């Protein structure tokens, strides 16, 4: 994995999301739909593997990896999809989504239904850490995807998933701790977490330590040398140090880890349709 190249790709995708711009593309387009606890992100990639568009919106449609507002999710995905189609001048046909490891076939079916309701041809529903690993281009190690609701773990050996695990501890639990400590409502707590990560880290460090212990317990019996941190809830400057202290392993966290999984989902969609290994 060349982290410098990966980070440049993420920065380019971040620019597309923030600016609302779309790039020129070649051939068919493929969309990754990441339905998170705090936001929904769509990423679009073309046949050549270039990310050409992206969009994000705050949402409360998912809780602990489970869809709790089906109609709200359909509405937001539909609106984001239509915005991207207008920008690109092309209908987005193929779509994929991702779920936390081990949440069950029911959740996978619901995500498929959401994609179908937004007029995507459903290509695949994969595990979130598996999607992240695809973008990172790794064959060995543990990918830890900490989102708003869950801590998902996938361990790869020679490109094969040998362990998948998920526990309902994520950014929302951090928000609850901040809210309680600072006497804020949960929405204000989340804003403070995003704006002042260094200031709130001492408050949420017990939650982060719990996440690290979850990972330690899951991978303790396996030969894992490197742990890759992705997901919005890992985006604290001191998170690497905390995980390194608990796991005593090499810790790698890419730039803006919140975008790694949605980009990986789009890449998975492209690879599956085009049958790329």
Image: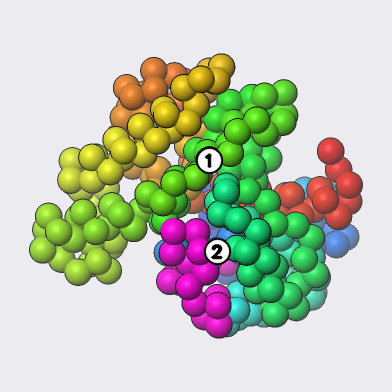
Q: Quadrant of residue 86?
A: bottom right
Quick one: label 2, few (<14), some, or many (20+) residues within 10 Å?
many
Task: In the rendered view, tell whether residue 206 sits above or below residue 190.
Answer: above
Q: Position of residue 73 (x, y in %)?
A: 55, 75
Location of residue 164 in the rendering, given as x and y in whole percent from the top left corner: 58, 39
Asked whether residue 65 is drawn in magenta, I would say yes
Mark 2 highlights which residue? Answer: 35
Q: Is residue 61 above or below residue 14?
A: below
Residue wearing tag 1: 165
Instruction: Residue 188: name its quadrant.
Output: bottom left
Secondary structure state at the residue bearing disc 2: strand
Task: Tell me if residue 171 is in the magenta stretch.
Answer: no
* Residue 53 higher or lower than 173, as above or below: below
Query: Which quadrant would the C terminus be assigned to in this image?
Result: top right
Please provide the residue range marked out in magenta: 53-73
Label 2 to label 1: alpha-carbon separation: 19 Å
Q: Residue at x 68, y 66 (%)?
A: 109
- Assess whether mark 1 and mark 2 are in contact (beta carbons under 8 angstroms): no
| 268 displayed left or right of 15 | right
């Amino acid at each position: 994995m060349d982290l410098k190249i990966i980070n440049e790709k993420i920065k380019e995708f971040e620019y597309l999301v923030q600016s609302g711009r779309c790039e020129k593309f070649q051939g068919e387009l493929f969309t990754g739909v990441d339905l998170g606890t705090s936001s929904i992100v769509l990423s679009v990639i073309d046949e050549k593997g270039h990310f050409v568009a992206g969009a994000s919106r705050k949402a409360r449609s998912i809780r602990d990896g489970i869809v709790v507002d089906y109609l709200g999710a359909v509405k937001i995905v539909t609106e984001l999809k239509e915005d991207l189609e207008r920008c690109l001048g092309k209908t987005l046909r193929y779509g994929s989504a991702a779920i936390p490891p081990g949440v069950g076939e029911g959740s996978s079916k619901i995500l498929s239904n959401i994609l179908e309701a937004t007029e995507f041809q459903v290509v695949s529903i994969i595990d979130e850490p598996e999607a992240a690993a695809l973008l990172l281009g790794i064959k060995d190690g543990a990918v830890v995807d900490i989102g708003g609701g869950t801590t998902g773990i996938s361990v790869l050996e020679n490109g094969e998933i040998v362990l998948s695990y998920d526990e309902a501890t994520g950014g929302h639990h951090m928000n609850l701790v901040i809210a309680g400590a600072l006497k804020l409502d949960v929405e204000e707590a989340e804003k403070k977490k995003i704006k002042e990560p260094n200031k709130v880290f001492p408050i949420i460090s017990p939650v982060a330590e719990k996440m690290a212990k979850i990972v330690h317990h899951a991978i303790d019996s396996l030969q894992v040398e490197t742990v890759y941190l992705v997901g919005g809830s890992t985006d604290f400057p001191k998170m690497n140090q905390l995980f390194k202290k608990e796991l005593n392993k090499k810790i790698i966290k890419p730039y803006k880890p919140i975008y790694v999984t949605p980009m990986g989902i789009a890449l998975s969609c492209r690879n599956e349709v085009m049958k790329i290994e």
